[in-house]
Image (spheres, helix red, strand yellow):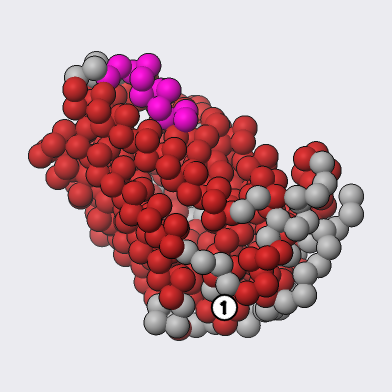
Amino acid sequence: MLREEPQFRLLFLGQLLSVLGDRVTALVLPFAVLAVGGDMGQVAIVSATQFIPFVLLALPAGVWADRFDRRRLIIISDVIRMLCQVAAAFLLLSGHATVVHLVGIAALYGAADAFFTPAFAGLLPAVVSARNLQQANALRGATFSVSAIAGPALGAVLVALLGPGGAFLFDAFTFAVSIFCFLRLRQTGAASKRAGAGAGSEPFFRSLRHGWAEVRSRSWIIAFLGGWTAYSLFVLPAIFVLGPVLSESEFGGASGWATIVVAFGVGSLIGDFILLRWRPRFALRVAAFALVGASCQAAIIGSGLELWAVAGLELITGVCVTLCFTLWETSLQEHVPSAAISRVSSYDYLASTGMIPLGNVVAAVTGATLGVERALLVMSGAAVVVALVVLSVPTVRRLPRSIPPAQRVQHEPVPS
């Protein structure tokens, strides 16, 4: 596929390095806070600061991504995030960094990141042909899978050799590569001319309402937004807040937890390879079944099984997560008009990423009340119930494949 899509090759290369850099700094950020004299509470504050701008800006970012040139918006986002990492690197390497500095940089970084994701969701169908759209999403998913495995290891090496500042400098370099690739990227076909046509000529709040109208007119989108909310509210926080705590007593600490995380990453990569070859007739139906499997992640960790059994089952859930995410994104791109795709995707990101900070609080309270193992089972069980409800929605099970609206005659936004 990479041979057939020269524009996607640019996008793929830039994103492979950029995502790797993101995974490196995700590991390094807590050590950077500790290196400047912060405590664990301040680590949590700096980490959460990256999400708060996203929650506030996700929906407006979707409107602007449909209104303006998405490629240009992505480049601006990358430039701001690169400068954030350069500033963090300079302050850390010079010994002048404080927790306040890192909080401010994290907030600005999160604000720029909020504009990248909706714009990218709308850009992809404009640079990839319809027949290769699922494969493009699978290859992009592979960048996350590979980075989830390689990023922490590379981050640990960079911290050992150069300190946290050197790791931030590496991430800045990956953003520079991404910017170079996007500067050379050219959107193809009529989609590039129509991008933003539905939002550019109307007032901001009317455009925002039209985006919601596109969402509510499709019951399968409403259903999956509910599924993503439950997954991000119950499953992910339960894993990343309670999982390491349980690992300390049940799986041998950090080494055991690393085994589980790597097994999940390998499963995700297997899922990406499956979707490079398999094009299911009812993509969203497969995604809904996979969401049920993905929602079992926390329960598996809290099941009391041996480490090898937990790692093996987490590998399977990694396959499920990749199938679910990739087929869901492909379904959005196939059925939502190009002029509204960024606004619709912004609701998706708000229901997923935006729920994580609240989920961290829920996981902490539930774990303190019920105990870690029981909390993992309860939170995962709640997400499974919601996933089964998603699967029960007729339009989820019956939604056919389609040529992306971005690559056929453009539809007008649904009136409010």
Q: Is residue 390 visible?
A: no
Residue sitting at 65 percent across and 50 percent down? 68
- x, y percentage for residue 49? 47, 27
- Label 1: state its secondary structure: loop
Please report the bounds of the magenta region as a residue range.
97-108
- x, y percentage for residue 411? 81, 67
Residue type, numbered disc 1: Ser
In this picture, residue 119 sits left or right of residue 403: left
- x, y percentage for residue 396? 71, 67
In this picture, residue 127 sits left or right of residue 65: left
Residue sitting at 32 percent across and 29 percent down? 87
Return the residue nearer the eye: 255 or 334: 334
Return the residue nearer the eye: 69 or 377: 69
In the image, residue 365 sits, relative to residue 139, either above or below, namely above
Secondary structure mainly formed by the magenta segment:
helix
Q: Is residue 218 visible?
A: yes
Return the residue nearer the eye: 371 or 343: 343
* Quadrant where the image shows the N terminus: bottom left
227 in magenta: no
- x, y percentage for residue 170? 25, 44
Residue sitting at 56 percent across and 67 percent down? 187
Return the residue nearer the eye: 366 or 403: 403
Q: Which residue is mark 1?
A: 129
Based on the displayed image, in which of its 4 quarters is residue 270 positioned? bottom left
Based on the displayed image, in which of its 4 quarters is residue 158 positioned? top left
Outermost left residue: 161
In this picture, residue 344 sits left or right of residue 39: right
